Amino acid sequence: MRTAVIIPAFNEADALPGVLAGLARQNPDHDIVVVDDGSTDGTAIVARAAGATCLRLPFNLGIGGALRLGFRYAVEQGYDRAYQFDADGQHDASQVEALLAGLDDADMVIGSRFMGVRDYRVGRSRGMAMGLLRRLVRLICGQAFTDTSSGFRAFQRPVLELFAIEYPVEYMESVEALVLAVRRGFTVREVPVVMHDRAGGRASNRSLRLAYHFVRLLIVLVAGGTSRGRRAAS
Amino acid sequence: MTGQTHALLAGLTVVAVAVIVRLVRRQVLKAKYTVLWLTVGLVLAVTASVPTLLDRAADRLGIWYQPTLFMLLAIGFLMLLAMHFSYELSRMEKRIRALAEEVALLRGPEDENRRAPD
């Protein structure tokens, strides 16, 4: 079984070496693919120095665009499964095994911070927004998820094939992706994982931007996701 | 309409048509926009040279204040145009994204030779 690790990275040269070393130590047989999303620091150089494959986008597409390229690469290179891992040190390589074990009876697995044993603190307004999203997602999917914004996720090949073509490209794409996968009839489940605070980079939580994307996401979800998704469901 | 406002409108129309003709002659517009703007120029020229035309049309439609008709048509047209541009922009953005992905794949995993522009 060939497994790819997809790491979208935008100006993460500082945190990346530690992340890659941790992954290589835990799972030496997984192939690491760093998608350099138009970085202006040495992200690509650092990634290649660590022995990872690095795909370089000519300019910044945002997390969704970078991920879609990673999925596409994984599909084209014939990988059986892949998982997404953050470049900023938020995710722990020791949790990968538990995440991948979830794929035994699911097409897509989400590593949830909130099913875990330890506490993970988020801001109040952010927490409220995430709570509202959770409820909406449960309504649409008919299934409860505790951590819809998690970027620690694993995918079987059929899901990769879907996401390689139509992965949502806007910010907070993980919620849209989750709904898309469920609508297409894939089984999605969560497993509890532990995450760190960020080692480098900047959390994207400027409130105005967040508020805009929150409203946009609500509209997109209520309107039935993508029109393609609606057609497939009907 | 007084003689002064008519002169003003005629002047503005001449300028607008001149800009349109210049753009078309330099062939910087796509064919469909050339047709679109030439039509707009023609409509403007006709309404400016036959000022009673709009007034009579407004009367027939029961519009008491005649310039409202012009405003209505202009705003409607501009709204449609703005929507069309939103559509075109969205489509272009999608294509540019796909191209960027293609570029990254074509560069391949080993390419070192260029940094991303700021």
Image (tube, coloured by chain):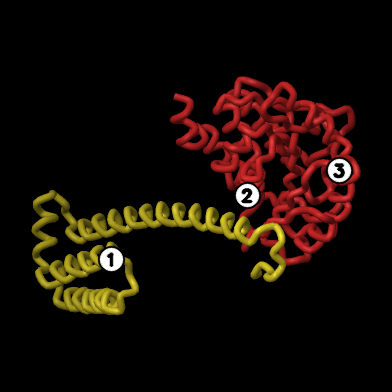
Chain colours: A red, B yellow
Position of residue B78 relative to residue A113, above or below, is below
Badge 2 marks a residue whose secondary structure is helix
The residue positioned 79% from the left and 50% from the top of the image is A87
Residue B64 or residue A58, whichever sits in front? A58
Kindly identify the residue that appears in the image at 86 percent across and 43 percent down: A28
Looking at the rendered structure, the kind of residue marked 3 is Pro
| Residue topped by disc 3 | A28
Check the residue under mark 3 and report the chain it is in: A
* Residue located at (69% from left, 24% from top): A106
Mark 2 neighbour density, 10 Å: few (under 14) some (14–19) many (20 or more): many
Q: Secondary structure at mark 3?
A: loop
On the image, numbered disc 1 is attached to which residue?
B31
Q: Position of residue A73 (x, y in %)?
A: 64, 47
Q: Are marks 3 and 2 in contact (CB under 8 Å)?
A: no
Amino acid residing under circle 1: Ala
Q: Residues within 10 Å of mark 1 (few under 14, many from 20)?
A: few
Quarter occupied by residue B4: bottom left
> How many circles with numbers are drawn on the protein?
3
Determine the image quadrant of residue B46: bottom left
In the rendered structure, the answer to whether residue B85 lies left or right of residue B76 reads right
In the rendered image, is residue A172 in sight?
Answer: no
Give neighbour class at mark 3: few <14, some 14-19, many 20+ (Cα, 10 Å): few
Instruction: Indicate the amino acid at tag 2.
Output: Leu
Q: Quadrant of residue A108?
A: top right
Mark drawn on residue A65: none
Q: Are marks 3 and 2 on the same chain?
A: yes
